[in-house]
Image (spheres, coloured by chain):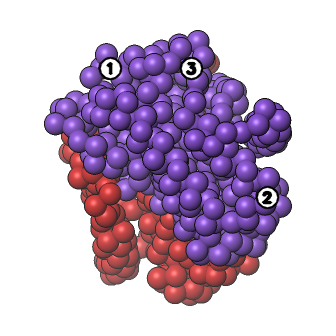
Chain colours: A red, B purple
Amino acid sequence: MLEFSERFITAANRYIETLRQEVNETLDLVSKFDNGCPPQLGDAVRYSLLAPGKRLRPLFVLLACELCGGQRQLAMPAACAVEMIHCYSLIHDDLPAMDNDDTRRGRPTCHKQFDEATAILAGDALIPAAFEMLAKMEPPELAVRCCRELAVAAGASQLVGGQMDDVLQERTPASPTQDFLERIHLRKTGALIRVSLRLGGLAAEGTEPQLEHLDNFGADFGLAFQITDDLLDVLGDEQDVGKRLHKDSEKGKLSYPAILGVEKSQKEAERLVNKAVDSLTAAGSKDSISFDVLRFMAYRLLNRKC
Amino acid sequence: MLEFSERFITAANRYIETLRQEVNETLDLVSKFDNGCPPQLGDAVRYSLLAPGKRLRPLFVLLACELCGGQRQLAMPAACAVEMIHCYSLIHDDLPAMDNDDTRRGRPTCHKQFDEATAILAGDALIPAAFEMLAKMEPPELAVRCCRELAVAAGASQLVGGQMDDVLQERTPASPTQDFLERIHLRKTGALIRVSLRLGGLAAEGTEPQLEHLDNFGADFGLAFQITDDLLDVLGDEQDVGKRLHKDSEKGKLSYPAILGVEKSQKEAERLVNKAVDSLTAAGSKDSISFDVLRFMAYRLLNRKC
């Protein structure tokens, strides 16, 4: 694994923090609904959307845009859109009929803080809000392409399909294989991460090969992210992570450590991170800050604390 | 009320049936998901989307397009999109945490036929599918405008906001007023009907004043539709309507008959239908089939059996 200097780590973290703050400020602005929106609904949307989070997907949008030579503000609507879709999927996944989770990002989940009906509706409201953001992009050709790509990634064959399979396998656990697990995660987590990178590239008018490389980076990063997430559930500290741990194993939930064991899971994450960085190198300028930061984010997965 | 000849009624119904069939065939085609979509999810989406329905909103899209001089096939993606949004909102509204309904269009509701998680996800999958449809429209300027308008209509201040207020008022019934009820329905039912007419007009490159008149037609039609729906719950025949009746009054649900009484509700519906037809007259050519059919559909509300 690549070693980063203390100085680089500080600078990279500061850069990430700047982008995260820009995203948070924009999300705050665009989630101030007019008075047609019932206060309780607006509160629930903002409670979930503005909760402290890593903002991984919007960061990818902005960094991919910069990597392809664009001004990151061009990609900000897309950054907000992917976070809105991510947020809706968390709200709905946490519902009693699905994963039935009580805490999320260190706070009560939306349906615990409000109630089930409100949580369902808050999620429902976030999906069109995401497409409204994308429809504001210029020129219209770009806006339409982004709408189409996000619609596919958030649709029945990707995000929602992955979650459906995840729910189904929890009910009737089959003999789990790595392939099966990958198939779920490539859709449930991977699709939205991949499209985040693509939308950023599109906003910068990146070439099709660039989009392809960014997409591959996203796919491998997404799987590595999931593996390290599963590892955190086994090895992590509950306070750092901000949610209840060991619930995967308690529920007998399919996970990489359960299939491969801890050590092989760590090796697999490492392999994927290296592959992701190769795609990144193929995608764009090695001399840019965004390249360094994306590579840093990939390697950092292997040392995740939260 | 205007009298229609038997011959006209037969012709109008045949025309409506033709359009409905075109819509059904297209919905069938566009809801065949690829193999990334788990069969159970695809089944649930198609079970709800292809259930026999009036297809009121898609009919409005197509007829408004024709009224503004466009070929209705231009508006077909928008027709499918509004039906997808309508269908998702029915699936989610029927959930136990919301209206808790067991039947819909004469069949078990989606969560009764499948289960709650599947119903939530089927609804979730339909929203991006709607925007994917719109993003296919040409030219991109039109696609983007349609995405924006549908996003607003399906968003926190309109469709979802109306449903939230409806849920909230059922829990803590305030002293009901006609204004309050209208405010709910203008968003819960009205927004999607209005945008259906607007999208049809947009597909035909209708003028802004035309869009405005179509919008007004939709707003008045939508309220009249809701009033006659409430009246059906009191006066209708369960077999004709295809869902359990008298549930509004059983639940103490806010309704026009409850506030105004049956007779005044009927008068109000009549007033709104006449106003809607005035807007229609202002919107477009009185010599077109689509004008006659839209007017017929408005007057027919006053004789609803289902």
Whether pointer 3 and pointer 1 mark residues with C-beta atoms closer than 8 Å, the reply is no
Count the numbered circles shown.
3
The answer, for residue A195, to whether it is visible in the render is no
* Residue lying at 27% horizontally and 33% vertically, measured from the top left: B259
- How much space separates mark 2 and mark 3, taking CA atoms? 31 Å
- How much space separates mark 1 and mark 2, taking CA atoms? 41 Å
- Horizontal relation, residue B289 to residue B143: left or right: right
Amino acid type at circle 1 is: Ser
Judging depth in this view, the residue of B47 and A130 nearest the camera is B47
Q: Residues within 10 Å of mark 2 (few under 14, many from 20)?
A: few
Q: Which mark is residue B249?
A: 1
Which badge, 1 or 2, comes first in the chain's sequence? 1
Determine whether A123 is above or below A93 in the image.
below
Which badge, 2 or 3, comes first in the chain's sequence? 3
Label 1 marks a residue whose chain is B
Which badge, 3 or 1, comes first in the chain's sequence? 3
Q: Which mark is residue B288?
A: 2
Q: Which residue is mark 3?
A: B241
